[in-house]
Amino acid sequence: MRLFFAAVILMAATIPAGAQWLDRRWPGIPRTADGKPNLTAPAPRGPDRKPDLTGVWNGPPPFARPDPANLQSWVTDLVRQRQQEYYKTRPYYQCRPSGPEAGRFGGWKRILQTATAIAILNDDLTYRVIHMDGRELEADPAPSWMGYSVGRWEGETLVVDSTGFTDKTWVSRYGVSHTEALRVTERYRRPDFGRLEVEVTFTDPGAFAKPWGFDVNFALAADTEMLEAVCERSSELWTGTLSDAANSAMTVAPDVLARYVGVYRGFWFENRRTVEVSLSGGQLIAKIADGTIAGDESRPLVPQSQTLFEGLGLGYQFIVDDKGVATDVEEIHVSGPWRFPRQP
């Protein structure tokens, strides 16, 4: 399990201390009678009477998985290769900017809005500038990690077009690549003081048969501050592949594996989580079906013992009764083991 534990060490170095948010009262915002921020108040407006998006925002990672049938064959080949390598070349794992990667559209953001530019600051210390001075997109921009963005207002909606992304970035944490012709369109709406709705569309004929996208819903994190979450350990020393793990794995009898097949449900932090375990070709497959961190990705489970398995960087420990039948599964993260009971 050398590579699995390498993944644990890597992610432990990149996860922020979520319990350390500052308690700091913001001036000049609407409040209820008890002094709490009134998040249902009307959205603030700038001097141009357009919605002002300024604030500290937090949103869950979006569920963003393109239909495999929508991917060009070369993209599909890269996805398979990167899965075999446990996604170790993901820019985020290499302490590089994530650029347009879908999963990184969520998380903590600070937005600063002026009449001529909007800045989006990320907790990993990367940032974007959206030019609002009427300029056009560059026809042939120099490739960059965060791209080049221009914005305009369509009524109450901020529309942002971005190009110029280096093809070193991904559009999905699951290994989906793109060409340098990628165009990203975002539509921002602030329906009230406490909500920010973002609709994102990826267009790249060289990589996708048709455009695809996802939504992100942010909540205003009023009376607090955004702390940095800096990657401190790269995946450069990450060694091994899924094939290596399979070749060195111990053998578990098919009748034993069959006792682990089933549906397991519980909570991962505050998120409901479902793990569907199936048996195919003598190998257990775990499918996380809740759209939180892993979407509906199928994870081959490589046995490390009769009850402990490794699945693309997560551990799966089956808890069995006196007959060897699984009653629970513990999904092992850097945050600890999370137990999910087997469903009838």
Image (cartoon, rainbow, N blue to C red):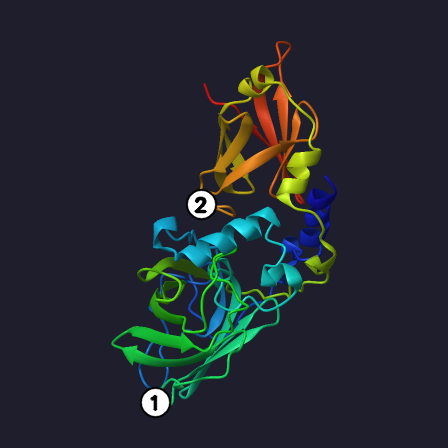
Which amino acid is tagged 1?
Answer: Gly
Q: Is residue 338 above or below residue 134?
A: above
Separation of residues labelled 1 and 2 (CA atoms): 38 Å
Q: In this figure, which residue is indicated by the disc labeled 2?
A: 291
Q: SS of the residue at dot 1?
A: loop
Which amino acid is tagged 2?
Answer: Gly
| Residue sitting at x 43%, y 60% | 218
Where is residue 55 drawn, in percent x and y?
48, 71
Where is residue 322 drawn, in percent x and y?
64, 10
Q: Is residue 30 above or below residue 116?
A: above
| Residue sitting at x 36%, y 80% | 151
Q: Quadrant of the C terminus?
A: top left
User: Residue furthest toward the left?
Assistant: 155
| Residue sitting at x 50%, y 83% | 142
Disc marking residue 134: 1
In the foreground, 264 or 82: 82
Q: SS of the residue at dot 2?
A: loop
Q: Are marks 1 and 2 in contact (CB under 8 Å)?
A: no
Q: Quadrant of the N terminus?
A: top right
Q: Residues within 10 Å of mark 2 (few under 14, many from 20)?
A: some
